[in-house]
Amino acid sequence: MSSTTTRDIILDAGLGNATAMTLDNYTFPKERLRKTLSNPKKQPIVLVSCGSFSPPTNLHLRMFEEAADYCEFETDFEVVGGFFSPVGDAYKKAGLASAHHRISMTRIAVEGSSKWIGVDPWEPLHKEYLPTVKVLDHFDHELNEVMGGIETSTGEKRRIHVALLAGADLIQTMSTPGLWAREDLSRILGHYGAFILERSGTDIDDALVQLQQWRESIRVIPQLIQNDVSSTKIRLFRKRGKSIRYYIPDQVVDYIYEHDLYIDDEKKQAEKDKESVSSDSASSSQS
């Protein structure tokens, strides 16, 4: 993929150049939100997935589809939008690509595969680390205070419910004593609620026991087709020089190769030296 094509995809998402954005020129990306509520008897909901997304995988995208199906068939919610919210650089997790790369990759992933999932750069544009609860409060403010909610077919405005969308591994961290502030858990799980996708190798039942007081607002979505692709495994494959194609969206793969992401410094230098030798050889041949 050419760099021009990559920029075009990012711009097509209505989200500008990731490297040029700041909090000063930030605008909430509402382009992909549904404009009106289809069923006035249902409660509008926006799903927000917070995470590293380094890189985003097909399973991250699939989470939104699974949650949308679950909402339609198992709840009184109507999904009117979904958002990736990548963490900022201050999170300092191992293997974390820079924020502008992760914003770009998530945008590229949704642009080529979805019409209703967006990417909000507000969180990663902050230099300081933002707790998940502040991110959810941000979405609630933008959707309901700034936008005023969503219209029904009669023109009435309805408040949009915001909920966290995550994998089972997040619920496990929430159940670990001392890892999350109790008041944050109370607002995240008690006020907003969470949709949790089951994951192979993760015992979600033990975690739910520790979070029993919020059990009614934690909705567990069964993963009918097991998929254990993870960003960690993608990064490991990349460092070992193995193919990562078909685990993540093709255009994200192209972006990773284009920007030499997730390979160690020695291998990166070896690739640059190899390119330099090839270029020199080509020049000699032309001469």
Image (cartoon, rainbow, N blue to C red):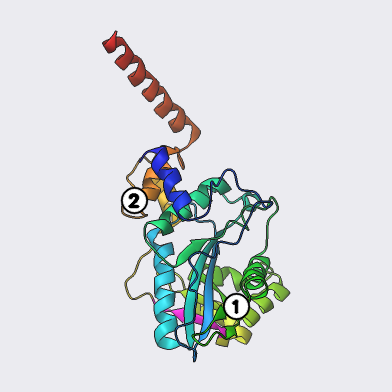
Q: Is residue 59 left or right of residue 49?
A: left
For marks 1 and 2, give the CA distance.
35 Å
Q: Which residue is mark 1?
A: 149
Q: In the current view of this chain or complex, which residue is farthest to the left? A: 285
Spot occupied by residue 104 in the image (x, y as percentages of width and height): 49, 49
Spot occupied by residue 181 in the image (x, y as percentages of width and height): 71, 70
Q: Is residue 117 left or right of residue 48?
A: left
The magenta-colored residue range is 217-222
Among numbered discs 1 and 2, the one appearing first in the sequence:
1
Is most of the magenta stretch helix, strand or loop? strand
- In this view, the residue in front, 119 or 242, is 119
Quadrant assignment for the C terminus: top left
> Which amino acid, mark 2?
Asp
Q: Is residue 239 in sight in this rendering?
A: no
Q: Which residue is mark 2?
A: 250
Q: How many residues crowd around disc 2 within 10 Å: few (fewer than 14), some, or many (20 or more)?
A: some
Q: Is residue 192 in sight in this rendering?
A: yes
